[in-house]
Amino acid sequence: MVWDTIILGAGAAGMMAGAEAGRRGRSVLVIDHARAPGEKIRISGGGRCNFTNLGIAPDRFLSQNPRFALSALKRFTQWDFIARLDAAGIGWHEKALGQLFCDGSATQVVAMLVGDMARAGVSLWLDCAVGEVRREGSGFVVGTARGPQTARTVVVATGGKSIPKMGATGFGYQIAERFGLPLVETRPALVPLTFADQELAWMRPLAGVSVPARVSSGRTGFAEAMLFTHRGLSGPAILQISSYWREGEPILIDLTPGQDLAAGLRAAKAAQGKVALRTALCHWLPERLARHLEVAAGVTAPLAELGGAALDRIATGIRNWQLVPVGSEGYRTAEVTLGGVDTRALDGRTMEAKGVPGLFFIGEVVDVTGWLGGYNFQWAWSSGWAAGQAL
């Protein structure tokens, strides 16, 4: 049999593209080496799938060409995907910062997509390894564990390198290179940051402490929760900034965002001058962190003995706390991969490789990486939908 299209990868983007192409009457084969489809969907959002965000906008995606994603995101929006969940009877709710989650299990989203493919006549081969992809005539031959398969078009939806224990590999990048497509250097993104031993010596006793913070790298900053761990720092604010931070650069942490800490400390001195600095800081910060900051500031005297300049210095240090990570936890815990197939080589409307007619790249394998909070799933839905219309 000669398929109209073979889709490599049964994740969010691949299943979306498969269902769309099948609805348009195409003969579609979706192949994945995993034993179950949509594994990243299943584990996302604590098992409730943060499936999109109400604030989808091009400036919330990282890419060498941030405007590349605009066409797909405009043509299949967050509202379009929400409508599909509503039609499937899948309840959802909004959390902070426009993040949307399923009321129930993320497996409902997987089941919806698998059902969409089945109704569209799409064939799904799981636990099936894929080998060489080569051009043959005007189409392609894909080597598989079930024998070579021929197709008019091929869609690469194999994802990135993040979370290798779930089977993630760089296979999609290898296909791109084989066909002469350029790549943007890949690195772990949305990932906890790690620190040298001298920082870990005081961080480890704080493991488990979470605090609202604004974390910045260069001109970019995020005000969300920050979490101390045994390896360094995590939490949404850290995951967000990890996509922008580079080795050797500092991150800047404001532990009391939106507040005038210097004025607060002056007020505490006037009202309770005999208390220790750590006691006053507990008004804004967890006790264990307050104790560390007192020691780091070298303060042993009560507030009454601290002058205005000293209080200003302490407040500035807490609101402009500079730390230099040594790295990240890597692909093992990264939620996504930054970089990938260079968007200059792709048609932004169809996701087709400009120099290789019939070869498409969608989802995480492309150099489009969203913020934390449903943005990467929306890119998967939108890019998969766009390719599905062109197959």
Image (cartoon, grey):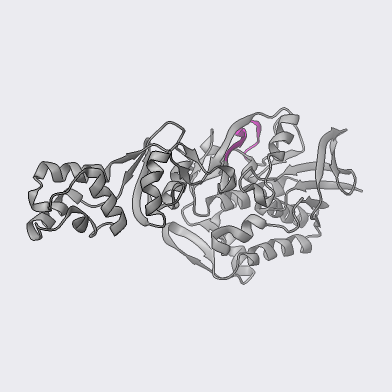
- For the point 46% across and 34% down, which residue is it? 246
Snapshot quadrant of residue 141: top right
- For the point 67% across and 62% down, which residue is it? 110
Check the image and report above or below for 374 versus 90: above
Snapshot quadrant of residue 113: bottom right
Q: 127 or 22, which is in the foreground? A: 127
Q: 180 or 119, which is in the foreground? A: 180
> Quick check: 316 left or right of 362?
left
> Quick check: 270 left or right of 30?
left
- For the point 28% across and 41% down, which residue is it? 320
Image x and y of residue 299, in percent = 18, 46
Q: 53 or 47, which is in the foreground? A: 47
**Whether residue 79 can be seen here:** no
Labels in figure, total: 0
Image x and y of residue 169, in percent = 69, 42
**Whether residue 20 can be seen here:** yes
Q: Is residue 368 a member of the stretch shown in magenta?
A: no
Q: 29 or 26, which is in the foreground? A: 29
> Quick check: 151 left or right of 239?
right
Q: Which residues are magenta?
A: 338-348
Image x and y of residue 353, in percent = 70, 34
Image x and y of residue 31, in percent = 78, 50
Check the image and report above or below for 310 versus 135: below
Check the image and report above or below for 264 versus 317: below
- For the point 43% across and 31% down, which residue is it? 248
> Quick check: 340 left or right of 55?
right
